[in-house]
Amino acid sequence: MAEIINMPRLSDTMEEGVVAKWLKKVGDKVEEGDILAEIETDKATMEFESFYEGTLLHIGIEEGEGAPVDALLAIIGEEGEDITTILNKKDVSGSTDTTQTQEETETINTTEAEEIPAGVEVVTMPRLSDTMEEGTVATWLKKVGDKVEEGDILAEIETDKATMEFESFYEGNLLYIGIQEGESAPVDNILAIIGPEGTNVDAVLTSVNQGGKPKQASATSTNTKEEQAETTINTPKEQASSNTGRVFASPLAKKMAEDKGIDLTEVKGTGENGRIVKRDIENYSPVVKAAVGTTTKKAEEAPAPVQIYTPAGEEHFEEVKNSQMRKTIAKRLSESKFTAPHYYLTIELDMTNAMQSRKQINALPDVKVSFNDMVIKASAMALRKHPQVNTQWTDNATRIAKHIHVGVAVAVDEGLVVPVLKFADQMTMTQIGGQIKDLAGKARSKKLQPSEMEGSTFTVSNLGMFGIQEFTSIINQPNSAILSVGTIVEKPVVKNGEIVVGNTMKVTLACDHRTVDGATGAQFLQTFKQYMENPVTMLA
């Protein structure tokens, strides 16, 4: 009997996974324990083994594709087994039956869309800014029954950033207003209908609601108009409009030209009848003009404008697909920053004794201790004396951890992972250093297991090795605090009333004010300072 394999939840925070690589292909024999695929989670790329025996009959998620947890990943069964029923039930993308269903749906939608009379255009709420999700109609400049020409301002729409004029890309009569003044609606909701007088608006609305696809004013129609315009460039009508000195440009193009300091008379329009549109401003490159014999001596002596070289077709941005790790980092840190009331405490440490102690410790055979190892040990011991910093906030209670598990932020190519040192207060500095080295190596080779990244109660982030003197971090929830560690700086300091050369290091504690009060955080740093400035006390 065929066995359905779903996208597994390989970490406690995993919501979706990406198939990095399939190690089996359809038709291959699969034994229990065989590695089926490598799956990229929000934390690492992990091998996923089969718990079944049989033949790999179907792959539901191709390499490089992502899907939510519990989505159909694969089907294993007996060779030649009919899995059509399973695929239909699961509605697997790419299967024969689903393809037929999609084709039937497209046919139905096409039929319904064709019910919209010719010349009728459904105008939807436009996306007027990159972050706009909904808009509010501030003012309608046309009313139902008015004639509308291409380029007429239909309405003023309030976005999340500004109130902007929205122009029509169609000609006809304003037949219907879908969003009244002062009302708001999400992007792509029906804003208006433009078409010939006498059109049955109710029939158009019914058709749209039943699947007739509204045309996008900002994309489909614009491209169509501009494609038509390409065949009419240099027509007598356009030349006549240019000779009169009047410049035809869309409001958006005028605004862009004003912002960039572009003279619209020097821009060649590609819109209808030579109208200047957004694309023309974006593609415009200043051209060096040849001197005319009748120019004045002052003009001849003026330096020619520098021609800016813009490679044809070059994009302004390169898009890199966000990995699952990057998506999760963005989500978790945003949640932390916007929900936990952060505050920051900074203290400067005298590292003279720490440097001497480390030198003596590392002189021992087979021993290697870093300053970061000292920081982690001092943090763990300070947490033991100040348990309020070793806490977690919930809506109903503050959870005080009985154990001390220190997370250590490790940079990898795709972002940041936080392996956890369990019971760090009970480890020696040498043990801490050895375990960090092992965990950091696993992190960079994407071999960390979820269990090695779970359960932290406090986090240390160290950028001292990059020369950063001082910085603040976002709390790694559900922790209540994170310690940011800077580099050791050699500078003049005052000791016993005299200026001498000293070595100092700044650390900043970010605290969640819901669980850690200012005095509590300050007391923690005082204890931490005592341990770091006198490392021998950590060995007692």
Image: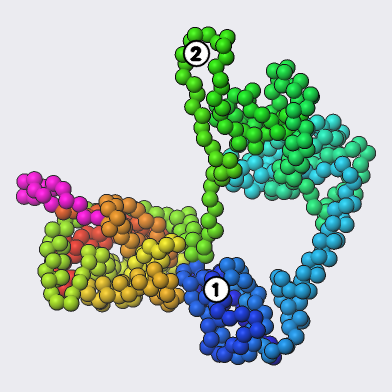
| Helix, strand or loop under label 1 | strand
Give the Cα separation between the discs numbered 2 and 1: 66 Å
Image quarter (top left, top right, bottom left or bottom right) of the C terminus: bottom left
Residue highlighted by disc 2: 300
Vertical order, 521 against 365 (above or below): above
Vertical order, 409 against 131 (above or below): below
- The picture quadrant where one finds residue 448 is bottom left
Q: Which amino acid is tagged 1?
A: Lys
Please provide the residue range marked out in magenta.
487-502
Q: Which amino acid is tagged 2?
A: Glu
Q: Mark 2 and mark 1 in contact? Answer it, CB < 8 Å.
A: no
Nearest to the observer: residue 220 or residue 237 = 237
| Magenta highlight: main SS | strand
Q: Is residue 324 left or right of residue 163?
A: left
Q: Is residue 345 magenta?
A: no
Residue 63 at x, y = what percent? 59, 70
Residue highlighted by disc 1: 21
Residue 14 at x, y = what percent? 53, 70
Q: Is residue 383 left or right of residue 142?
A: left
Vertical order, 419 against 281 (above or below): below
Nearest to the observer: residue 116 or residue 530 = 116
Q: Is residue 490 magenta?
A: yes
Image quarter (top left, top right, bottom left or bottom right) of the N terminus: bottom right
| Helix, strand or loop under label 2 | helix
- The picture quadrant where one finds residue 478 is bottom left
* Structural crowding at the residue carrying mark 2, measured as other residues with C-alpha within 10 Å and reported as few (<14), some (14–19) or many (≥20): few
Q: Is residue 522 left or right of residue 4?
A: left
Q: Residue at x 49, y 9 (%)?
A: 297
